[in-house]
Image (cartoon, rainbow, N blue to C red):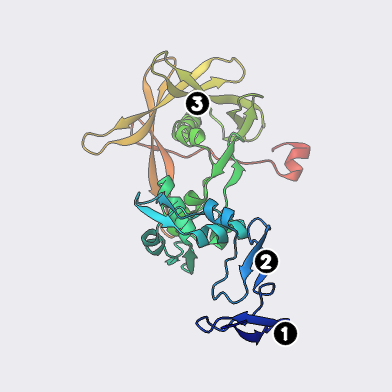
Amino acid sequence: MGNWLTTTCDECGEEVHYRPDWDVPKYCKDCSHIERDCAVCGSTMRIGRDWEHPPKVCKDCKDEFAPKDVRCRLCGHTFTLATGIQIKCKENGWELPTKCHDCKEKYSPKDVDCRSCGRSFTVSASRQIKCQENGWDLPSMCEQCRETLAPKTVECRMCGEDITFSTNFQAKLKAKGWELPTKCQQCKKDSLAFQAAINALRDEFPFAIYVEYEKRGILSREVVAVIRGKRSNDVVAEVKMQEEGIFITERVAVSKDAKTNKEIARTREEKVGFVLKENAAKTQDSRTRKTTHTTKMEKKGVIEPRVVPTTVRTDGTEVSPVRREPLGFWERLFGRR
């Protein structure tokens, strides 16, 4: 064969002819290429046996996943998605990156102290980005505290309506050492006028009285204060909250005689004071149209002081509050003595 030289194939051992100015071939023509499946589409492709960096994908897939420019969803700058990254995302079922390298570093996982229990927890990069996109604050409580202080619904102890407390609201109360409210917003607003009207009835009857609360109504529940004689246990009066006005309405506590159903008094809340305004409930006799009692929230007690509604007459003397006195077992059977 003239200037041709001969060697053997490393794979099959057949003779391979080559010229002196060529590199010595390692494989024959048949063994020089092998078949491999494309990592993306699975089609068969031929690659050189001695290639240092054999391709993992076919030409069609390489063209499909050619480098593309993408705009970062956080900072708006353009960055390039390499073919390898696109293929890796395809293989693992991941979504393509939507944020640049700088934003990834900026939103790297960070440790935060829980504002409820004080323990440290990690806020992931994806959570930080989600908060940034939606304009939310970063989480300030650990997962355990969020579960413990998960939103809960309780019944108002006055009207029975549902009250829902959010996680943040519960956390704020816990930080201040306060208990959860037991009244809804409406009952809380009505409480001063309601209690003032009840206390004012102390001067209406010449015998000891106590109060029981009843929930009435089906669609909208209302609270009715039932005033009973302490000895007879008979109902002597009732107090209800009513709305007055057409364009501007206000809540008024109305007291009525249980036997005659005649109105005894009306109690409404208003601001009093010249410099420092404070809430007060004034009770007006329905017969004379004169103010008979004024009720304010005052701090009582020395060891365990608490704020309670205090009712005074026009002459400045204080009225002892009308309290709840539920019937005991024997009293329910034989009545009060």
> Rounded to the nearest whole Å, what is the CA distance between mark 2 and mark 3?
101 Å
Q: Position of residue 127 (x, y in %)?
A: 48, 56
Q: Whole-percent x and y of residue 176? A: 43, 57
Q: CA distance from mark 3 to mark 1?
A: 122 Å
- Location of the C terminus (image quadrant): top right
Q: Position of residue 319 (x, y in %)?
A: 44, 37
Q: Amino acid at mark 3?
A: Glu
Q: Which numbered disc covers residue 204?
A: 3
Q: Is residue 245 left or right of residue 213?
A: left
Looking at the image, which residue is at 43% across and 25% down? Answer: 267
Q: Nearer the viewer, residue 163 or 11?
A: 11
Residue reaching furthest to the front: 2
Residue annotated with mark 2: 36
Residue 177: in sight, yes or no? no
Disc 2 crowd, CA 10 A, few/some/many (<14, 14-19, 20+): some
What is the distance, in whole Å, between disc 2 and disc 1 at their CAs? 23 Å
| Image point (65%, 81%), residue name | 16
Type of amino acid at the residue the image marks with label 1: Gly
Residue 108 as seen in the image, left or right of residue 223:
left
